[in-house]
Amino acid sequence: MTLPDFFIIGVPKAGTTALHAALANHRELLLSKVKEPKYFLCDDQRPRRENGPGDAHSRKEWIWRRDRYEALFDGPRGLLRGESTPFYLYDTAAQRRIARLLPAARLIVVVRDPVDRAYSNWLHLWSDGLEPVSDFRRACELEDERIRAGWGRFWHYRRVGLYGNQLERLLESFPRQQIHVLRYRDVVETPAHAVDEVCAFLGVTQGTVHEVPAENTRGYVDWSTRSPLLRSTLRVGASAGAWFPPQVWRKASAPLLRSLQRQSAPRPEVAPEDRRRLVEFFEADIKKFGALLGRDFSDWLGDHGAGEFSVRKASPGRSHAVGPTACVKRPWLPSGRQAS
């Protein structure tokens, strides 16, 4: 069988797409042809129905059959295989499925200030015309109601950011040495060093990937007199898209998205009072997360976030020297199994 040796398991809107693209350029790694297959969310069953705008259309793209999943990793022998589904950290059942089938797997977790992450998540859906609520704080307040109504994981703005609880559960299935936690700020500001840390963790040559591309970023789409109609059309179309192959709706929706996103505006910062309210929600979990890792995440407790990708990239907070090229043995592969 051909299954992954490692996973990027979290978190959404923290650079997982960019890291996946960067690692795909490494000659000793083979990343899945589909970036986010979601196979271990499914347990070899058709994905359950989800009721948020666009959820039914998105569900058609999940890779839930074992043969289709294994086909994502076809390629030369001797490479380490990997895939990236950032909801695996959030889903305890997925973690247990991975542990049962691939107990020696290595797991990469990219984390981001949970308020910034939630805001970027809301912004992503807002800019795609799917989020019906124009106020970020109000959208967060609706989270429990939406979960009860069966909206998908990507609408769980706050709960996805409870990294302490999620890591605690993950450690019930995997030993600490098989988990590498990376900060989003390092992926953006010191990409070569961040990738080298991942390569060292995986046991492949360092110093061969020097950049992490900007992937899956969104500009802010301001409200306008035209946007309500465009947004309504996109939401209705996404629902109808559940009855057609995913590529059909993506092609049909492209002109609408271009028209909506043409109205891009400077991205506003989360208001300090809104951020303080969310920090109160996350504070205990942030402290738990830091205690589990023996690291300090108190910078997430302030009144201001770190800003969007372009701002971080233009003004990096610190720099690291890239370590020397090295090749580390792969002692963690399952006994008797080749990295085929």
Image (spheres, rainbow, N blue to C red):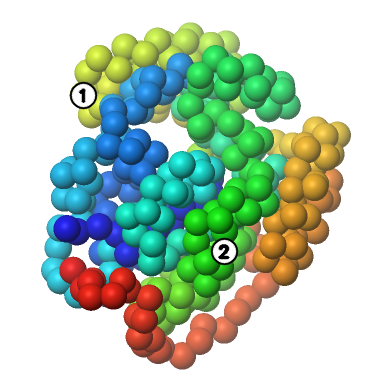
Q: Quadrant of residue 44?
A: top left
The amino acid type, in three-letter code, at marker 2 is Val
Q: Name the one closer to the observer, 214 or 33.
A: 33
Q: x, y percentage for residue 96?
A: 44, 49
Where is residue 43? Give x, y as percent.
Answer: 33, 38
**Residue 301 visible to the viewer:** yes
| Residue 135 can be seen, yes or no | no
Q: Residues within 10 Å of mark 1 (few under 14, many from 20)?
A: few
The x and y percentages for residue 209 are: 38, 74
Give 116 or 309, whichever is nearer the viewer.
116
Q: Residue 245 has which mark?
A: 1
- The quadrant where residue 47 appears: top left
Q: Residue at x 78, y 55 (%)?
A: 287
Residue ID for mark 2: 181
**Label 2 SS:** strand
Q: Residue at point 60% right, 25% down?
A: 222
> Label 2, label 1: how many angstroms apart (C-alpha)?
36 Å
Q: Is residue 200 left or right of residue 58?
A: right
Contact (Cβ within 8 Å) of mark 2 with mark 1? no
SS at circle 1: loop
Q: Please tell me how crowded label 2 is: few (under 14), some (14-19), or many (20+) other residues with Cα within 10 Å.
A: some
Left or right, residue 210 beside residue 309: left
Whole-percent x and y of residue 93?
46, 42
Task: Name the residue rendered at 60%, 61% in the picture.
Answer: 183
Q: Nearer the viewer, residue 53 or 224?
A: 53
